[in-house]
Structures are given as structure tokens and as C-alpha cells.
Amino acid sequence: MLRKNKMIKIKKNAKKSFVAKKSSKIEKVSVIKNELEQKRVRIKIIGIGDGGAAIVAGLAKELNKVDSWVANTDWRRFKKFPPIVKVFNFGEKQTHGVGTGMDPEIGRQAALAEKEKIFKILKDSDLCFLVSSLGGGTGSGATPVFAKIAQQQGIMTFGIFTLPFKFEGERKARIAKESLEKMRSNLNTSLIFPNEKIFQGLDKNVSFNEGFAAINGILSQGLQGLIGLVFQPGLINIDFADFKTILNNKGKPAYLINTEFEKGIKVEDIKKKIFQNPFLTYNFHHAKSVLFNIVSDVNLALGEVTEISQLVFGAVHPDAKIIFGVSFDKKLSGKIRVTILAIGGREKNFDIVNKKSQENPIKIKKSRKDKNNKKGSDQQKFEIKIRRNAIQVKEEVKAEEENIVAKERIWETPTILRKGFL
């Protein structure tokens, strides 16, 4: 009888222990779930001004797990946006709700007056995309304020900007350039799309709406690819820490592409797919920070991964920081998707400002060759870069002076010595 009671007691204790362990496991799983929820990457995309707001409104439905906002000083535009998009109207005192009249200073003042609200909108974000069409008043004036507030909060900030057409005039081009330069130090990176390039890469008969739909399509694909990198688990995983590592290049423009192609296509065709984005001012070659991801079905071959990886490695800077991932998607049967974000490469040239409108140009003596080549010189090729500082300007002028002095020294030598008669 005693033995039987002892056995019953042991069984009860064992059952209690099992229940305790089970509840402990449930608690641990619950804690892990809560931690994952807390660590979930919070991404915002904010369209600022008419152009930026229109782009974000077009992208919002396509971007899952992203908080979409539009911010504008022209309140009449807000009726057109889908319900999924959150609205922030600002600048009532400065603009009375009817826009800035292409004055970036009014846009800046309107944003500064709402600093606290902008701070709250950006608060707790891990990554923020700021989208605007530069050259106008709200986008060019207010976006630098948003960028500065985001950086003050330690938020990774990614700019996406379009630049004006040449026919929109030099004033717009100058406003866009100055706005970009103000923002550089407060952006981790940026994508720059000149409107001129958008339409150069399309058929001449394409309508304006179709042209801007094309840019929205490119942006949507690229952003979906980037967001997928962070949220989609893979065989070789890329996480937000990797993303932050690549974005740790203040002010550098980015190259972004998210493209799909059939398995088994020629290497040259793969190159065209992953290295050519005709709409950007920036190319992939010699990039110093690269993040790329390869997605396909479970039958993805090692040779296919190696082939694509070698193309990427061969194009970037020898000392480039490279992070890559591989993941699977059942929907990509017989296809491969490649997403590439590259920072620190070369910028392409494009026409933006007329020579006559250059501020404080450096006067350097032109060679005879330059004088004879005046045709087409009314437009200057301009790279979107930070303005040269005084030391750089001084060095350039000094180099030119030394070149002129060297030429003059030749003629100081007597003819009899120059011609080799002695």
C-alpha cells in the first residue's frame, strides 16, 4: 500500500514538472514573439510636395509592410490620394494651403514651423524613404528639413528624387541642385532620376502619363526588392544590420535594380539586365558598397549563383564591401530575380544648367582647341556632386597657372637652342 501511494506521488510530481516545463516553453515562445514584434523593422515612405506625393500615392498599394505618407503645402491635392496613404498638410501660415509658388524658402519655413509634428511622424522609424520632385518650392525647400530631423533621430534616410526637364528652365534646375547639396550630409544615400533621362529611354510616342508610370514601375520594383531583402528569410540571409552597413556612406548616390530573367540566358544578356538602369544618373561600376540578393526556385544551381556573383564582383571596386544573399520563391519557377543596391560608384553626366547661369565661374584661359569648339557649348555637362571647396578650386587654378608658366618658359629659351642648332 505504501509502495502504491509512493508511485502515485511520483506520477503526480512528474505531471506537475511536465506542466511547469510546458508552461515555461509557452512563456519563452511568447517572449520571443514579443521581442520579434519589437524588433520588426519599421519603414516609412514620405512623398513631399506635389511630385513626391504623386509618386508615393502610386507606390503605396504595391509596398507591403511600409507606412506611406504624403506631405504638402497645397492642401487641394489631398482629395486624390488612396485611403492607405496618411496625409500631413503643413504651412498654413506661410502658404494658406495653396502651395509655395516655386519658392523653396517658403517651403523650408513651412516645414520648420512644423518641426515637432515632423519629428512625431518620423519617430521610431528604422528606415525612411523621402521622395520628392526637386525644382519646386515644397519638395526642394521642405525635404532638407525632413532629412535633417530624420538624421537627428538616428534614422537611416534614403532619398528618392526626380530632377526637372531642361525645358522647365534654369531656375528650376538651380533650385534642384541647391536642394540636393543641402541634403547630402543628412542622407545615407539617394536615387536620382532626371526627368530628361526617363523620356530619353522611352519611345518618343509614349504619353506623359505612361512615362511617369514607367518611373513608378522602376521605383516600385526596386523598393519591393529592397524591402524583401529585409523581411524575406533566405538560405543565405540578409538582415537589417547588413542593410545599415551598406548605407553607411553619407551623401553618396545609389544604383538600384530589381530584375527578373529566364534561367539559361547568355552572360551578356544577364549583364544588360543587372548593370543597365537607363533612368539613373549613377552607374554600378567601381561601387564601394554593394548589397545583392539572388532569388529563384529550389532548383537554383550553384553555377547560376556563381555566374551572377562573378559578374557583380568583376564590376565593383577591388576593395568593395559586398554582402549577398540567396533565397527561394516557388513563384519563380525557371526564373531568377536579382536585386542590387550599389553605393560609391561613378556618376553619369547629364545636362542640367546653362553655362551663362553658373554662379562665380572660375576663369581659366582657354586653349585654341576650345575656342574652335564653341558649337554646343551653351550647355554644360554637370555632375550632381557636392560643390567644390575653396582648397580644390585653389589647386585647380594653381595647376592651370603652372601649365601656362611651363609653356612660357619654352619661349624664353633662345631659338638657336630650341631648334637644336647648338
Image (tube, rainbow, N blue to C red):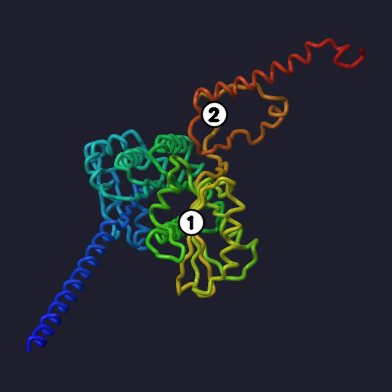
- Helix, strand or loop at mark 1: helix
Instruction: Report the side of 364 relative to 108 (left or right).
Output: right
Task: Decide if residue 22 is in sight here.
Answer: yes
Q: Which mark is residue 211?
A: 1
Q: Three-letter amino acid code at disc 2?
A: Lys
At x 72% / y 17%, what residue is drawn?
406
- Helix, strand or loop at mark 2: helix
Residue occupied by mark 2: 356
Q: Residues within 10 Å of mark 1 (few under 14, many from 20)?
A: some
At x 50% / y 63%, what residue is drawn?
294
Location of residue 396 with respect to 217 vertically, above or below:
above
Location of residue 404 with respect to 182 vertically, above or below:
above
Quarter of image, res 275: bottom right
Instruction: Report the side of 66 relative to 117 (left or right).
Output: right
Q: Residues within 10 Å of mark 2 (few under 14, many from 20)?
A: few
Quarter of image, res 350: top right
Q: Pick whichever, 201 or 150, lies toward us.
A: 150
Task: Decide if residue 256 is in sight here.
Answer: no
Identity of the residue furthest to the bottom in this view: 1
- The quarter of the picture where the N terminus appears is bottom left
Q: Three-letter amino acid code at disc 1?
A: Gly
Q: CA distance from mark 2 to mark 1?
A: 30 Å
x and y percentages locating residue 370 in the rendered image:
69, 29
- The quarter of the picture where the C terminus appears is top right
